[in-house]
Image (spheres, helix red, strand yellow):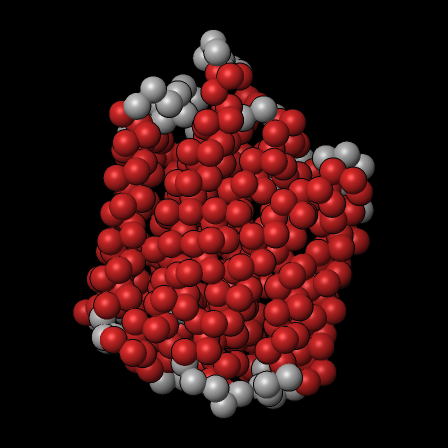
């Protein structure tokens, strides 16, 4: 059954998009403060890059299970409570980093991914239900702009607090940011905003959703686009901080690097204009080619060197282009009556990326130097660029 848009909602779309963009930025701030610290804390606690990789694999398994069952959660409770649970997961995760100093830290890593996955599913549903398809690119650009501001400030702030003030303080600030975003979410619900209402649709079992999703060719391509994009970002946020340390720089430079990359999202309107002129498909293909070339460059450099830092930045330019447009193929190709179940499956790209990227890295490290991992991900980027050519010209 198609979801009915409330009367006069067309006139409210602009406000709805702005509210969702602000909510996205607030939610992203809490994670952004922690993201550069997580691999460092894990490395200090667990002792090796291999152990950090294993912790991220374990955390990814937890997040994948939860995200696949978001649709089932919505059948048990209103969506506002699902979102609330997701945001509170970040609060619990920060407490793990405050008080846990053993392998259980993997649960904290997983809960950060759970928070991101649950919020991602619900936000995508809000967007598809109440924003016109013609406005998807504009809305994604605005959302990425707000998210970019949060991720520009968050990593540097977190590393500065961790290195210069108190090691516990960034996690306390992250808890505060998560609670502020939760409060803003409930303020929106209490107003006249029609976005924050209980959904009418219900999702069947995840085991029924998955085959239906992958039987649809365009959804398969859309999923590959987001998974491979996600693999780059997982590689960046897990291994780039370690790369900075191995290159001989202080921990503070990790925050500078992550914030500099995140600041690229401020140029989302430029990507929006590129998509309007050349088509989103072509820009998506270009983004993957840029990432692939950057990772190939890192492999050519080999062990961590200062020269590799601008190469990481160059690859991130392509990934930023995909951040703005990567969800568009799915949003435009999914059937309206299948939005909830298909979004539940689609949103597992984050968790699958968090599993596959460190899993591949662990396998590569068994048989080759770590730089060979960059070549593997680069090959996946080039392959996805080719597959994306089969998307409709005007997605």
In this orientation, which residue lies closer to the viewer: 117 or 72? 117
Residue located at (58% from left, 58% from top): 264
- Viewer can see residue 14: yes
- Viewer can see residue 356: no
Total numbered badges shown on the rendered structure: 0
For this orientation, the residue located farthest to the bottom is 248
Q: Is residue 233 left or right of residue 222?
A: left
In this orientation, which residue lies closer to the viewer: 192 or 93? 192
Q: Position of residue 323 (x, y in %)?
A: 59, 50
**Picture quadrant of residue 39:** bottom left
In this orientation, which residue lies closer to the viewer: 335 or 251? 251
**Picture quadrant of residue 361:** bottom right
Q: Is residue 86 left or right of residue 375?
A: left
**Picture quadrant of residue 295:** bottom right
Rendered position, 393 above or below 147? above
For this orientation, the residue located farthest to the left is 99
Rendered position, 8 above or below 260? above
Q: Position of residue 352 (x, y in %)?
A: 51, 55
Rendered position, 355 above or below 119? below
The quadrant of the picture occupied by the C terminus is top right
């Amino acid at each position: 059954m198609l979801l009915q848009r409330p009367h006069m909602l067309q006139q409210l779309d602009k406000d709805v998009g702005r509210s969702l963009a602000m909510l996205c930025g607030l939610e992203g701030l809490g994670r952004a403060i922690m993201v550069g610290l997580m691999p460092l804390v894990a490395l200090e606690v667990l002792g090796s890059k291999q152990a950090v990789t294993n912790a991220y694999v374990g955390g990814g398994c937890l997040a994948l299970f939860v995200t696949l069952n978001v649709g089932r959660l919505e059948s048990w409770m209103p969506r506002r409570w699902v979102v609330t649970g997701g945001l509170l997961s970040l609060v619990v995760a920060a407490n793990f980093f405050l008080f846990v100093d053993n392998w259980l830290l993997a649960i904290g890593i997983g809960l950060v991914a759970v928070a991101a996955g649950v919020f991602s599913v619900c936000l995508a549903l809000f967007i598809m239900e109440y924003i016109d398809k013609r406005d998807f690119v504009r809305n994604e650009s605005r959302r990425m702009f707000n998210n970019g501001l949060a991720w520009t400030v968050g990593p540097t702030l977190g590393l500065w607090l961790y290195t210069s003030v108190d090691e516990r303080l960034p996690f306390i600030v992250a808890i505060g940011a998560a609670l502020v975003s939760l409060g803003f979410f409930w303020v929106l619900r209490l107003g006249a905003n029609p976005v924050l209402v209980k959904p009418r649709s219900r999702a069947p079992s995840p085991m029924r959703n998955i085959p239906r999703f992958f039987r649809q060719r365009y959804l398969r391509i859309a999923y590959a686009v987001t998974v491979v994009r996600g693999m780059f970002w997982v590689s960046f946020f897990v291994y780039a901080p370690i790369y900075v340390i191995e290159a001989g720089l202080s921990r503070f430079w990790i925050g500078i690097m992550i914030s500099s990359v995140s600041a690229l999202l401020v140029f989302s309107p430029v990507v929006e204009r590129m998509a309007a002129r050349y088509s989103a498909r072509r820009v998506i293909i270009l983004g993957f080619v840029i990432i692939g070339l950057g990772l190939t460059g890192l492999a050519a450099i080999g062990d961590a060197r200062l020269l590799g830092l601008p190469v990481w930045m160059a690859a991130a330019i392509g990934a930023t282009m995909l951040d703005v447009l990567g969800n568009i193929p799915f949003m435009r190709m999914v059937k309206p009556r299948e939005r909830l179940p298909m979004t539940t499956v689609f949103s597992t790209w984050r968790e699958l990326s968090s599993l596959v990227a460190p899993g591949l890295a662990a396998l590569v490290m068994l048989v080759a130097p770590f730089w060979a991992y960059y070549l593997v991900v680069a090959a996946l980027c080039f392959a996805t660029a080719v597959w994306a050519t089969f998307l409709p010209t005007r997605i």
